[in-house]
Image (cartoon, rainbow, N blue to C red):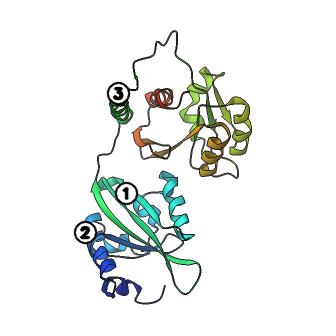
Amino acid sequence: MRAGLLAELILGENSELRDLVNQYNFIIMNPKGKITGFNHNLLQNSGLPERALMNQNFYVVFQPEEGNADLSIRLKAVLAGEPGPVEFSLPEKNLLFKGIAIPIYDDSSTASHIIILAKEEYVEILENDGLEQFWSSTKEFLNVEGICTAPINETEDMKKPRILLVEDHKGLISKIFSKLLKSSKENVMLAPSAEAAILMASEFKPHAVISTYEPIGEMSSALIREKMLEQVGAATILVSTVGGDLRIEDGWLDIHVKNQSESVSRILDLINQIYLD
């Protein structure tokens, strides 16, 4: 990036852009994700010192890449020339940033930097009762729309969802769902790799696929999600650990629950309510 670009953006002739930079949180990052510039608003709102931002990895400062695959995909699209909306956060401060990301070109056809303009908001982090809160609000919405959410007679009508688990390098999936794998042999299968999961799905036809952000194999979790939806219409739930919590994310649902034995039953209930045909 040529010297003085930050000054040009803030003090340049484009008054509209200058006003936006002065009004919102402003970040400049290079293609490798390193933060190379920011404004005072970001310092003030984040509560972070300059040394915690300058030349630091954007994904590490704001949200680990394993915690939100969609954020990484979005920023890669921006570098490819597609500006668009972004969301990122400082979970420890309950801060969520919503804004836009724009590619910056410097005498080249390839973007040299990304500009992010975002507004901050405080949010409550869902913990133990995250799934209960989510389902409660979902039922309220469905009832308003006239969609029945009455309890299903478990002995007569309850269907067991077919779940395809994808093994990961750290063995997280096998550990979390160990009891489920032992007790539900017909409707739960464990694929040894991402590629095996794609092959198994065509015959098993899962209602939902559960993977981490680092599945065994050459395929990324994002590609698994795309292939499963395309081939068998199955949603892919991505699971990761954040401290003592489990993070459950499927592209629009993003919640934290305590990593304990009852969390598995809550995940299964979620699959029953939302993903079961």
In the foreground, 81 or 68: 81
Question: Which residue bears the numbered disc 2?
Answer: 44
Question: Which residue bears the numbered disc 3?
Answer: 143
Question: Which residue bears the numbered disc 1?
Answer: 89
Residue drawn at 33 percent across, 87 percent down: 12
Residue drawn at 25 percent across, 69 percent down: 44
- Where 64 falls versus 136 (above or below)? below
Q: CA distance from mark 3 to mark 1?
A: 32 Å
Which mark's residue is nearer the viewer, 3 or 1?
3
Total numbered badges shown on the rendered structure:
3
* Three-letter residue code for mark 2: Gln
Q: Pick out the residue farthest to the bottom.
A: 3
* Three-letter residue code for mark 3: Asn
Q: Pick out the residue farthest to the front.
A: 146
Residue drawn at 58 percent across, 84 percent down: 108
In the foreground, 154 or 219: 154
Q: Are marks 2 and 3 in contact (CB under 8 Å)?
A: no
Which mark's residue is nearer the viewer, 2 or 3?
3
Quarter of the view holding residue 257: top left
Question: Which secondary structure lies at badge 2?
Answer: helix
Residue 27 numbered mark, or none: none
- Where 1 falls versus 259 (above or below)? below
